[in-house]
Image (cartoon, helix red, strand yellow):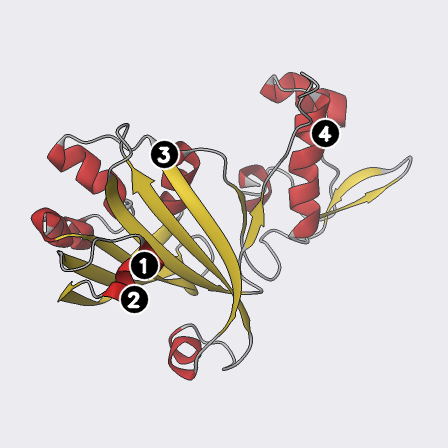
Amino acid sequence: MDGIAKGRYPVGSLLPTEFELCDMYEVSRHTVRAAINQLLSQGLVSRRKRVGTRVEASSPQGGYSHSLASVADLAYLAETQQREIQNVRHFVADISEAARLGLVPGEHYFCVSSIRVDRLHGAAPMCWTDVYAQRDYSTVIELAREHPEQLIASLIEQHYGRAIAVVDQQVRAVLLSPEMAQSLDADAGSPGLKILRQYRDSDGQLMTVSETVHPDDRFILVTQMRRDRTGV
């Protein structure tokens, strides 16, 4: 993708063969095919038998696709987008909010609401994100303004000596509210993808929670499942 964007593989040219890509990146043919499928899904390339993989566009068509398999992947995703903070609120979690987000009722928290823009493609709005954390971590609010490319969870790691061990993720379909649609330059009532992520340390203690809403044409979540060969 980087090579296409920088013109190393210009529109109309052919990518190296699967075997050549395996050698270049030292990965399996299965991995190469999965990567090419992602390029296909974004309209960057086309494939034809006995011709090869042809570059069709220099930038993704209709959104952003990413394969998330680790905390490092999430950090990379944050680096490719820019946080633009819209507002910050401090609150005491009520029962319904605590149940929805996994917070403790009656505890003090803050919420940083941001629009994330794609700095690689014209700063188009990609999603709306609300990040929740305990009041004890409130110094990261200014750090989040100073470092818009870093996850707030990563800033907590760096400045409070805690490490993210597990991220629990829930994905559901939603309809964009008029307010959300206006902020994201989308149509009110159109489909969206809501992703709730709970970041936990090695003891299972909650560090922070993020709730992100993407218009349906701007994000594709790619996962891979492997068959359990143990027979269990």
Q: Amino acid at mark 1?
A: Ala
Asked if residue 72 is positioned above or below residue 89 in the image, the reply reads: above
Say few, some or many: other residues with alpha carbon within 10 Å of mark 3 (under 14 / 14 to 19 / 20 or more).
some
Q: Amino acid at mark 3?
A: Val
Q: Earlier in the sequence, mark 3 or mark 4?
A: 4
On the image, numbered disc 2 is attached to which residue? 96
Quarter of the picture containing the C terminus is top right
Say few, some or many: other residues with alpha carbon within 10 Å of mark 4 (under 14 / 14 to 19 / 20 or more).
some
Say which mark, if any, is on residue 16.
Answer: 4
- Comparing 181 with 202, the one in front is 202
Badge 3 marks a residue whose secondary structure is strand
Marks 3 and 4, how far apart at CA? 37 Å
Say which mark, if any, is on residue 99.
Answer: 1
Marks 1 and 4, how far apart at CA? 50 Å
On the image, numbered disc 3 is attached to which residue? 166
Q: Earlier in the sequence, mark 4 or mark 2?
A: 4
